[in-house]
Image (cartoon, coloured by chain):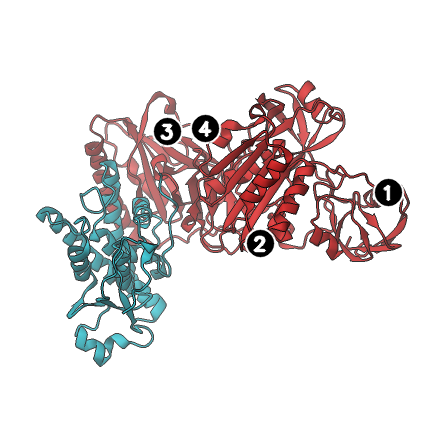
Chain colours: A cyan, B red
Amino acid sequence: MDCPDKPGNDDRYECPLMTITLYDFELSGNCYKLRLLMNILNLPYEIVPVDFFPGRQHKADWFLRMNPFGQLPVLKDDDLTLSDSGAILAYLAKKYDTSGKWFPDDPAVTAEVLRWHSVADDITSTSSAARLALGYGYAFDIEKSQKGAHRIFRLMDEHLWFGEKSGRDWLCSPAHPTTADIACFPYVMLSEEGGISRQDYPALRRWTDRVRRVPGFTVMSGIFPAGRAKE
Amino acid sequence: MPLSLSDPTWYPIASSEDLPFRHVYQGQLLGRELAVWRADDGNVNVWENRCLHRGVRLSIGINEGQELKCQYHGWRYANQSAGCTYIPAHPADAPARRIENRKYPVKEAFGLIWSAANDDQKFAPFAGAESTDWFPLRPMPVNAAPEDVLAGLARLAPDDQPADLLPGMALRLGTTVYFVQPVDAGRSVIRGLIEKPADEVATLRHYNETLTKLRDRLERAAAKKPAPEPLQPVFEKVSADLASMPDIAIPRGNTMPVVVKRKWQSADGVIGFELADRDGKHLPTFQPGAHIDVHLPNGLIRQYSITNGPGDLSSYVIGVKQESASKGGSKVLVETVREGDVLAISEPRNNFPLRRDATRTVLIAGGIGITPLLSMARFLDKSSLNYELHYFARTGDGLAFQSELAALHGKVDRHIGLAREAIKAKVAEVLGQYQFANHVYICGPGAMLEMVQETAASLGWPDDAIHFEYFQNDKVIDSSSAFDVELARSAMTLHVPAGKTILETMREAGLTVPSSCEQGACGTCLTTVMEGEVDHQDVYLNKTEKASNTCMMTCVSRAKSGRLVLDI
């Protein structure tokens, strides 16, 4: 099998046999979480596009056989089939991140990361729901979804503001980003597509700058690069 | 009292710490959204949150340090002036006119950023402001009407020590001062200042808890009332001047007075002049490669390139060559103009624009020709674009702007004391064979410009990749021809006699036409030719442009045919 183009043209990277396949929808923030981490880790993978909208292929029989919950993303690594973006983030970090930073082993930090993975799911059920309702015709309660997102963003802004005051730049306590930051990032950034302004959350906005400056960061439709970091 | 869109009061709109390196803050005051950003030089910009090109929010744009780049089509706007400096869709052109985003007054004081809806009031500190080293609290956004929030804050006061109301939606509670930022009719931000506490985080958490509870009470109360109508700010239309085709004739331009803030020996034979506004305001937007006309005390007008980097509008720095045989231009500047003197200058004009889409940019300077190229290098440097600057000088002592060059991160090579042939060999080596999207910019003595153009052409560089600017036109102008010019738009036919230029003839006929150097070097009087054969005598147009016979410089060039038709 040919080695695909590697991000960053890193010659040190020895191309293994392609093992990872992402079942992906380009406009999905949850699929983007995995593309983002795999890009940061410089992991090669193949993409199988799934037409979530308007084709609803994630409810097709062939897809339900992989993930009976009918949700994107799905990731295959050799014979292993995984679903749920947060679970897959943890798997990829534990298996492929040699630095051990993205999903740290320390029990207290693991608990912190998982706590924010759970917040990420709450962001999906509010901010992403509002986006699906406004942009994709889903029959979700828009006002309720928006209010729910604002409630979470207020708490995140407070957490991040006091973090800055005490020298913590990321959602969890280590001095580097973790999968918690990747899990929460996309639907914060895409919130305006759901009619949720981030104007009232300056510390949250600054955190999105920091995430966008992580080496290996990649964009998706609606998520733009930030200005350069101080050198 | 209902909020007014024209309320001239200064309100805090952000904390100083909300504007870290290369961030763009999103704010709002009296219904108007704001993009707020700090440039690398520390200056804070408060602009309407709307790119005037396609209306996209500038708060999602990129803070490039001294310019803000819109995320949509990459238009760039300068620090301080909000003037457009670059339009990627027209990479070879300088944004022709004064495209400027709407900006609001700004003041940074007491750890807060202050702004106002208009310039009607001067900023005045609140009573007692100067006595304390203030420490800002975490801002608390509240979805409630500003007057209700102010009343809520007043109710925090103990009965025996009522709140002291201050002008401008502010009050003092003991040693704490609170300001209500009127975001919109139903939205506010509480901003507080306290004396610097011993345990910062614990104190901030304490206030944050108090204000969070107040916010929740205020929002519960607001939810029971009908929501007030949001303010309806009027977005000013793009001015007719920007939205319409340019006038046929742009007047020569008003001059503005500037004061010589500093005059110094930059190098052996080069004097630096720093020119600033007399009242300390910023000067107009310029783009790299731009020059100004300087009106000299003896009545002469001379052009000098601006050496400044991006968004640096506090003053213009120019370099003037101390020529022994000067015709009275630079001589007057060097010998009689002193610090503190006032000079008249034109607005910046750019006939030497810099593309920012090149894969490789080579800047070649000879002597005082460094001035426009220094500005170009500084722009490319700030945006981390690839460039190399080659500076040729007769002696090491003659290298001007050394400290400015030392601050650059790109490749800067100084070539000292090379003989003519050695310069030619070095230029050929530096240029190499032409490759796609390479561009070279040259400024220096006439002989050097011609040599570099020839060398580049022999290495396959096309004319549109070779950009140059002459200081002056050394050619002897032949003005012996006589001919007619037909001015198509003005519906006028004029006879140009021998010894008189087209420009002079048009002016005598009452037309206002732009010009600057009037010797065929600067490019200001460039005119479209519709019919007739041009006798080009300028040094501004390149060979391809001259051969195309579609444009000319009316200050020196004439007609080979009996009649010329010009688009004037």
Q: Identify the residue shown where x is 60% and y is 50%.
A: B459
Residue behind mark 1: B479
**Disc 4 and disc 3: Cα gap in Å?**
12 Å
Residue designated by label 2: B90
Which of discs 1 and 2 lies nearer the camera? The answer is 1
Is residue B263 found left or right of A53 in the rendered image?
right
Q: CA distance from mark 1 to mark 3?
A: 66 Å
Circle on res. B124: 4
- Element at label 3: loop
Q: Earlier in the sequence, mark 1 or mark 2?
A: 2
How crowded pointer 4 is (Cα within 10 Å; few <14, some 14-19, many 20+) is rated as few
Report, in whole angstroms, how far the alpha carbon at label 4 lies from the one at label 1. Answer: 62 Å
Looking at the image, is mark 2 or mark 4 nearer the viewer?
2
- For marks 4 and 1, the one nearer the N-term is 4
Q: Are marks 4 and 1 in contact (CB under 8 Å)?
A: no
Chain ID at mark 4: B
Q: Which residue is mark 3?
A: B110
Disc 4 to disc 3: CB gap under 8 Å: no
Tell me the SS state at disc 4.
loop
Q: State yes or no: discs 1 and 2 in contact (Cβ < 8 Å).
A: no
The secondary element bearing badge 2 is classed as: loop
Give how far across and how far down residue B514 sits, in percent.
74, 43
Q: Pinpoint residue B321: horizontal percent, then vertical percent.
A: 65, 27
Report the Cα–Cα distance between label 2 and label 3. Answer: 43 Å
In terms of secondary structure, where does tag 1 sit? loop
Q: Are marks 2 and 3 on the same chain?
A: yes
Q: Mark 3 and mark 2 in contact (Cβ < 8 Å)?
A: no
